[in-house]
Amino acid sequence: MDEHHHHATSISNLNRAFIIGIAINLLYVFIEFGAGVYYDSLALISDAGHNLTDVASLALALLAFRLAKVKSNDKFTYGYRKSTILVSLINSVVLFVAIGGILWESFSRLHNPVIVEGLPISVVAGIGIIINAISAFLFFKDKDSDLNVKGAYLHLMADAAVSLGVVVSGMLIYFFQLYWLDMVMSLVIVVVIFYSTWNLFKDSLSLTLDGVPKGIHINEVISEIKEVEGVLDIHHLHVWAISTSQNAMTAHIIIPQNTDMEQQNRIKNKIKHELEHVNIHHATLEFETEDDNCTDTNTI
């Protein structure tokens, strides 16, 4: 009973951590963007866009966290879990548009340099370091318990480092009037955003098309299944994502002709147990014997 209560408390704490993280980061995005416009700092505006990816990442993680609890129905038999993939795809497209806007402004400033104030840039970016550090601390305790939580933690720590870079460039501008550093820093941030956004776009597009989820290797899955006693072969294997954190699989399992029902159940339970080790928790298995003639040609 105590163990169950502890698990519920952990879920409650994570839910609170996501909400607090989203709130303070979203507030900072508005502050940083406003300061960037006021002081005409492209680095601050770019970093505001970068920090907006924090908000989006936290929101997606929270969405996946909550949708995992929503029950399926007769219209959506997997519930609404796959909406996390769709939102990830939309989020990446929006970020690409934002990158295009920042690049356009950066190249415009190559021909028309803008004098910016270094000290306010450093102060605002310094606040960003504090915000990202506080947000990361919210997930520190549970970062090894869930991939979404770990991803949020690492993203926030990386963004604290980016904010530190903006602080340094602001101080260099303040002391040495190196105004071009503001534009250069904005381009560095664009590269960071593009790298993370490209991976998000590529992974979410693949999952939208029911591609094999990242981190799952078909040959490894087949090997795990074939090592189960009583399994002769496997075909008609399909692996896809139900959501950004849950994966499913269907397969035809070839077993000896004389395998009784009790043995089939043992084989099925053993296969499902092994599949959990390769991050597949929803498996539908169909048994066939050596003499069966499977007519499905769309197989692996």
Image (cartoon, rainbow, N blue to C red):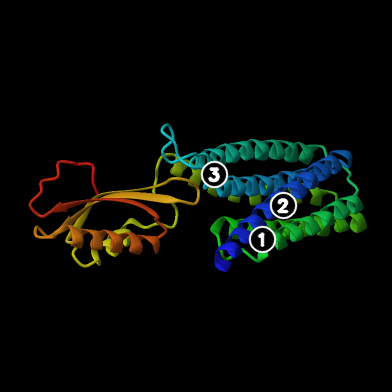
Does the rendering let one see residue 169?
no
Q: Viewer-proximal residue, 257 or 132?
A: 257
Q: Viewer-proximal residue, 289 or 97?
A: 289
Does the rendering let one see residue 20?
yes
- Few, some or many residues within 10 Å of mark 1 (<14, 14–19, 20+): many
Which-is-in-front pick, marks 1 and 3?
3
Judge from the rendering whether residue 114 lies leftward or rightward of residue 273; answer left or right. Answer: right
Distance between the Cα atoms at labels 1 and 2? 9 Å
Local SS, label 3 = helix
Contact, mark 1 vs mark 3 (Cβ under 8 Å): no
- Few, some or many residues within 10 Å of mark 2 (<14, 14–19, 20+): many
Q: Where is residue 83 in the image (x, y as percent from the top left)?
A: 52, 39
Q: Which residue is drawn at 64% across and 35% down?
A: 97
Q: Viewer-proximal residue, 88 or 16?
A: 16
Residue type of the residue flagged with mark 2? Gly
What residue occupies the far top of the structure in this picture? 75
Judge from the rendering whether residue 37 lies leftward or rightward of residue 222; answer left or right. Answer: right
Give the mark nearest the N terminus, 3 or 2: 2
Give the mark nearest the N terminus, 1 or 2: 2
Q: Mark 1 points at which residue?
A: 139
Residue type of the residue flagged with mark 3? Leu
Q: Which residue is drawn at 24% across and 62% down?
A: 267
Contact, mark 1 vs mark 2 (Cβ under 8 Å): yes
Distance between the Cα atoms at labels 3 and 2? 19 Å
The picture quadrant where one finds residue 134 is bottom right
Q: Mark 2 points at which residue?
A: 21
Q: Where is residue 113 in the image (x, y as percent from the top left)?
A: 83, 41
Q: Mark 3 points at which residue?
A: 67
Residue type of the residue flagged with mark 1? Phe
Q: Which residue is drawn at 72% across and 43% down?
A: 49
Checking the image for residue 170, the label placed there is: none
